[in-house]
Image (cartoon, rainbow, N blue to C red):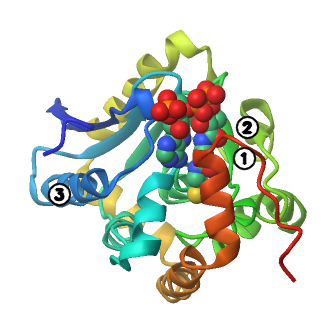
């Protein structure tokens, strides 16, 4: 497994840590593949009762690696995010996120599939898809209006506005906000509490709670289809180039 993902397990809890702090934990193909393998091993290992996701450094994840997007646009490689989103959205064991800073793009959309979220005070949640010439993924076009209401979801998904930790707590998007230094203690306490409960009752309760979204898998696939087209679009090419060249994007020539 790539060193950009650190996976450890103890006392019934598998911890998965995004570990690419020099790139703000932007997710590469190898990291997506590592996540799928870690989820698979957690689901099949009776010793693992809870999965906990977090990141190294000051960012939870800056989302998909934009350089990978550029390479995909030129090589037409298949998305590595797709198997990850399937594994994430069908996990049977409970998933906790400890959000240690900014969560951007898929860094935020993956959180809609977490059962409990603890945020550091420095956390903020941003989905800048439109500004990158893209559309939302991970079922976020369905889940965020349900989770946050249509107006706030529009502000996040259409405008790319950020939600800070306190606003996320007020909106019910996260369960707890704690000081940055307390993040892992708080998240591990929740994980330990879940791990001590009867595992079958926990899995069945999660299943019942998630079953109310019968069209989720269809929406994830519809989004991915559009997303695949958008990655190859001239609008996205301009946005990716602007990011890599550290300049503002100029969308004025597009109609
Ligand atoms: N893909 C690829 N590289 C990324 C990245 C991403 N999603 N996010 C950050 N990086 C890289 C930067 O290019 C920079 O690389 P360099 O040191 O080689 O120049 C490094 O990580 C540090 O990022 P920087 O922007 O200098 O740090 P910052 O603290 O000023 O800002 C962020 C941090 C996360 C707010 C900012 O990097 C950002 O907005 N990233 C893009 C997020 C995004 O749009 N994600 C895609 C969602 S679909």
Q: Nearer the viewer, residue 254 or 198?
A: 254
Is residue 108 in sight in this rendering?
no
Q: Is residue 215 above or below residue 253?
A: below
Circles 2 and 1, Cβ within 8 Å, touching? The answer is yes
Residue 3 rendering spot, x and y as whole percentages = 19, 35
Residue 106 rendering spot, x and y as whole percentages = 53, 56
- Mark 3 to mark 2: distance in Å? 31 Å
Q: Is residue 52 left or right of residue 229?
A: left
Is residue 100 in sight in this rendering?
yes
Q: Which residue is mark 2?
A: 169
Q: Which residue is mark 3?
A: 37
Q: Is residue 73 above or below residue 186?
A: below
Mark 2 or mark 3, which is nearer the start of the sequence?
Answer: 3
Q: Which residue is mark 1?
A: 172
Which residue appears at 83% of the width and 78% of the height? 254
Which residue appears at 40% of the width and 49% of the height? 27
- SS class of the residue under badge 2? helix
Which quarter holds ligand 1?
top right
Residue 255 rendering spot, x and y as whole percentages = 87, 83
Which residue appears at 48% of the width and 77% of the height? 211
């Amino acid at each position: 497994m790539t060193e950009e993902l650190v996976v450890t397990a103890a006392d019934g809890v598998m911890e998965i840590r995004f570990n690419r702090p020099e790139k703000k934990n932007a997710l590469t193909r190898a990291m997506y593949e590592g996540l799928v393998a870690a989820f698979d091993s957690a689901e099949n290992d009776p010793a693992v009762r809870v999965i906990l996701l977090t990141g190294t450094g000051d960012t939870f994840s800056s989302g998909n690696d934009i350089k990978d997007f550029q390479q995909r646009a030129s090589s037409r490689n298949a998305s590595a995010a797709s198997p990850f989103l399937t594994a994430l959205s069908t996990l049977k064991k409970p998933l906790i996120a400890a959000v240690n800073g900014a969560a951007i793009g898929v860094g935020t959309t993956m959180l809609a599939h977490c059962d409990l979220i603890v945020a550091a005070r420095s956390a903020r949640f941003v989905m800048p898809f439109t500004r990158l010439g893209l559309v939302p993924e991970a079922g976020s076009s369905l889940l965020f209006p349900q989770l946050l209401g249509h107006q706030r979801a529009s502000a996040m998904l259409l405008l790319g506005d950020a939600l800070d930790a306190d606003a996320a707590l007020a909106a019910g998007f996260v369960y707890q906000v704690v000081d940055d230094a307390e993040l892992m203690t708080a998240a591990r306490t929740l994980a330990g509490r879940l791990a001590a409960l009867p595992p079958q009752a926990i899995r069945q309760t999660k299943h019942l709670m998630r079953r109310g979204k019968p069209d989720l898998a269809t929406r994830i696939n519809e989004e991915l289809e559009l997303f695949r087209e958008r990655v190859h679009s001239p609008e996205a090419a301009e946005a990716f180039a602007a990011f890599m060249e550290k300049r503002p994007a100029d969308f004025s020539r597009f109609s």
